[in-house]
Image: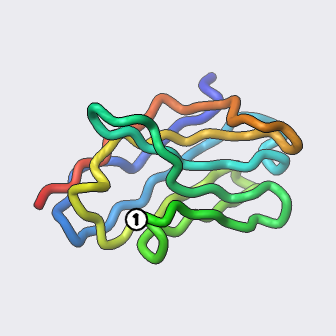
Amino acid sequence: QEPLIESGGGSVQAGGSLTLSCAASTRTFSRHTVGWFRQAPGRERQFVAKTHWNGGGTTYADSVKGRFTISRDNSNKAVTLRMNSLNPEDTAVYYCAAQRAFTPDFHLWGQGIQVTVSS
């Protein structure tokens, strides 16, 4: 079973919204910081947002602040990314990733899901 499975991607027009979901199978989900990253064609993967394991605090990339909202549900081992006011620059493959508490790296990654925003 894949440790992280993304869903909810697709195509939308500029100004529209999408919600991505990440379902985890790890038993210690509540002790993982979970984040979303994205990679556009020809570009490096970049950080989008994360929700911290300790208290659920959130961090966002400047490019998505005020438009994207990340949230987690520890009881269901799930994280969602609500994306509003999408623009073509948000087009990318989005990846869910998990980082175990007190470790430096995101060690679990999903397969990625495509988000396409047309102008």
* Nearest the eye: 28 or 43: 43
* Nearest the eye: 82 or 75: 82
Query: Which corner quadrant of the image does residue 41 belong to?
Result: top left
The residue at which mark 1 appears reads as 83
Q: How many marks?
A: 1
Query: Which corner quadrant of the image does residue 114 belong to?
Result: top left
Percent position of residue 61, x then y: 52, 60
Looking at the image, the residue that sits furthest to the bottom is 66
Query: Which corner quadrant of the image does residue 75 belong to?
Result: bottom right
Residue 67 higher or lower than 48, as above or below? below
In the rendered structure, which amino acid carries the disc numbered 1? Met
Give the residue drawn at x 42%, y 60%.
19
User: Label 1: few (<14), some or many (≥20) within 10 Å?
Assistant: some
Tell me if 41 is positioned left or right of 23 in this view.
Answer: left
Looking at the image, the residue that sits furthest to the right is 102
Give the residue drawn at x 83%, y 66%.
55
Colouring used for the render: rainbow
Give the residue drawn at x 59%, y 31%.
109
Provide the secondary structure element on which disc 1 rests: strand
Which quadrant of the rendered structure holds the C terminus? bottom left
Tell me if 37 is positioned left or right of 85 in this view.
Answer: right
Tell me if 18 is positioned left or right of 28 in this view.
Answer: left
Give the residue drawn at x 64%, y 51%.
78
Looking at the image, the residue that sits furthest to the left is 119
Which quadrant of the rendered structure holds the N terminus? top right
Percent position of residue 101, x then y: 85, 44
